[in-house]
Amino acid sequence: MGEGSTDTPQGVGHGGGREASHPSPNHVPVLLKEAIDFLNVRRGGTYIDATVGLGGHSYEIAKRLGAPGHLIGLDKDPAALERAKAVLGVRSSVLGESDGQLPKTYDLRPDWPTIELRHASFASLAEGRSPIADGILADIGVSSLQLSDAARGFSFQAEGPLDMRMDPQSERTAEQVVNHLDERELADVIYEFGEERRSRRIARAIVRSRPIRSTAHLADVISAAARSMKLGQKKYERIHPATLTFQALRIFVNRELDDLKALLEAAPRILKPGGRVVVISFHSLEDRIVKDAFREGGIKYKHFRVLTKKPVIASEEEQDRNPRARSAKLRAAEKV
């Protein structure tokens, strides 16, 4: 995912045939069947995948849209968009033509929708003022691609720079936050966005250990300041002491909650009547925002009909197959 102008797509056009490939077996979209079912994809419709990621959800949407359809995929992360282009079969011509037109693409499969990939945050949808979409899907949070690349700085499990930007072109990095916020501001970030009850102790340790330049160094500082805490009632399952602080920094650096609020505020304007918005979240802060927005939109403003009284969670089979699915919660609503 990333910040960027929606006027400069990464690729626009038709995918298909020999160019389109199934999503990588190493990448398993969370709650895939449930998300597609709730989205209720209509052939020939216009759908927005607000977090296209590696293209897994988008691929299933595209299969159902057919040639009359239009799929718009957004992501802050240019690397994710490049992977998604391969999965979705989007091939664009070389840029730099003097006429200034958008890159052309080649339709190699007759029954494949027009696909438009944009390097942009889904918060950019707030700029829309007219109903254009039959459905919006958002899979919130960090992707497996980002976590597995140590150079991106999202994970404390490998040595890497303190970056954490989903969009490498954005200005604020985790290193700047860690080394330049004062102790009280840093503690507030860790508490608000990580729900970390030991935020004061951790912030104090970070400030005393400055400068901190790497993920490993930061994880060591946090571990020394806060002991590992038990997760739930499982005796031997523990959460790493740096988990919540890294989560907080990532959310703060990428303005994730602000972007989510902007998306939910925009959804009633850009959805057509009967259109649906489906959101998959991975921690309580996000889920609370989605729940409240759908409830307020349904009761106060009469925008939505809530389709999920309780969040939909992954089956035990999916949780065993994909550990990331254990914390996933899906909520859906329909524009009235």
Image (cartoon, rainbow, N blue to C red):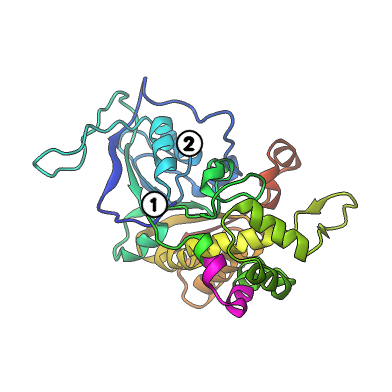
Of mark 2 and mark 1, the one earlier in the sequence is 2
**Pointer 1 residue:** 134
The Cα–Cα distance between marks 2 and 1, rounded to whole angstroms, is 15 Å
Toward the right, the furthest residue is 235
- Asked if the magenta segment contains residue 109, the reply would be no
- Asked if the magenta segment contains residue 184, the reply would be yes
The residue that appears at 29% across and 23% down in the rendered structure is 108
Q: Where is residue 106 drawn, in percent x and y?
A: 25, 28
**Pointer 2 residue:** 60
Identify the image quadrant of the C terminus: bottom left
Toward the viewer: 182 or 87?
182
Is residue 242 shown above or below 45? below
The amino acid marked with disc number 2 is Glu
The part of the image, by quadrant, that contains residue 89 is top left
Magenta stretch prevailing secondary structure: helix
Label 2 or label 1, whichever lies nearer to me, is 2
Toward the top, the furthest residue is 18
The residue that appears at 71% across and 56% down in the rendered structure is 220
Q: Where is residue 87 drawn, in percent x and y?
A: 43, 31
Q: Is residue 218 visible?
A: yes
Is residue 35 shown above or below 14? below
Residue numbers of the magenta segment? 177-188
The local secondary structure at tag 1 comes to strand
The local secondary structure at tag 2 comes to helix
Dot 1: few (<14), some (14–19), or many (≥20) neighbours within 10 Å?
many
The amino acid marked with disc number 1 is Asp
